[in-house]
Image (cartoon, rainbow, N blue to C red):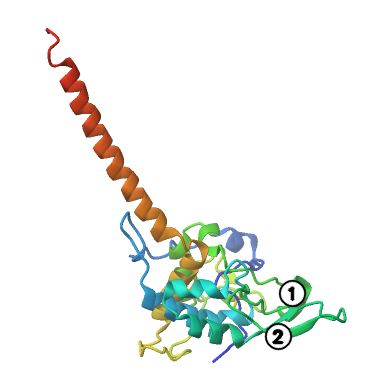
Amino acid sequence: MRRTVGAIVAAFVLIGSNPAAAAEEAAAPPSMKWTFDGLFGSFDRAALRRGFQVYTEVCAACHSLRLVHYRNLTAIGFTEDQVKAIAAEVEVTDGPDAEGEMFDRPALPSDRFVSPFPNDNAARAANNGALPPDLSLVTKSRIGGPDYIYGLMIGYKDEPEGMEMAEGMAYNMFFPGHQIAMPAPLSDELVEYADGTEATVPQMAKDVTAFLVWAAEPELEERKRMGVKVVLFLLLLTGMLFAVKRAVWSNVPH
């Protein structure tokens, strides 16, 4: 089920009802325990596939993922045939052909994720003048990273009594000023997970956040593995150097 909704993250213009409200700081987002945290953290492939489903069925209507290729999806557990089928569901403009004309064709695994709009002006025209941000690096570019993205998606509430909301704005407890141009992107059972997981708002928010973390840093696990090897090597080298030092100086009178 696809909805034309705002971004997973709010990059739209904040319009406060008054200067004091606009300057008000947002509440701190919840501190989540992510599987990819820590020195030995890794991605939960099932969660990444669910997050990809949320991105595809909810977010991709407005937001691009320009730095990710369809072929990259094999890293989160999709087979090559599945990736080909996923890519073929959308069309890309290619060319020119032998006659010098551009043409549309089904996307290939080698293509980048197809953007929902042909250009920025078209994106603004479809979103009341606001440009939905690309989500490729969003978890690295927002203070708070994945915790903030998760908090933003679960932070939609009814505005407090007496608070005046600007036209077209929604209340979000984790957004600075609390007034955000993006309507709530998630609602319970908005998607039907292929693995049968219950699609609650917190579950979908957590899954798509994990997917966006992977999209921003697909080499995270490899980097951590390399870091562990380097630390072990340095510890071994330190021990060897200490042993050599003891051996060299063992016969020197004190």
- Give the quarter of the image for residue 120: bottom right
Residue toward you, 50 or 17: 50
Q: Position of residue 203 (x, y in %)?
A: 39, 79
Identify residue type, mark 2: Arg
Query: Which residue is at 60% across, 66% downward?
Result: 67
Identify residue type, mark 1: Arg
Q: Position of residue 76 (x, y in %)?
A: 43, 74
Query: Which residue is at 75% across, 78% downward?
Result: 94
Q: Choose mark 1 or mark 2, whichever is in front.
A: 2
- Give the quarter of the image for residue 204: bottom left
Query: Which residue is at 72% across, 76% downward?
Result: 123
| Placement of 140 over or under 89, stated as above or below | above
Quadrant containing the C terminus is top left
Question: Mark 2 — residue?
Answer: 105
| Placement of 7 over or under 249, stated as above or below | below
Quadrant containing the N terminus is bottom right
Q: Position of residue 57 (x, y in %)?
A: 54, 86
Residue toward you, 23 or 11: 11
Question: Mark 1 — residue?
Answer: 124
The answer to whether any part of residue 171 appears in the image is no
The answer to whether any part of residue 222 appears in the image is yes
Answer with mark 1 or mark 2, whichever residue precedes in sequence. 2
Query: Which residue is at 64% across, 64% downward?
Result: 18
Residue toward you, 29 or 162: 29
Name the element at disc 2: strand
Residue toward you, 190 or 104: 104
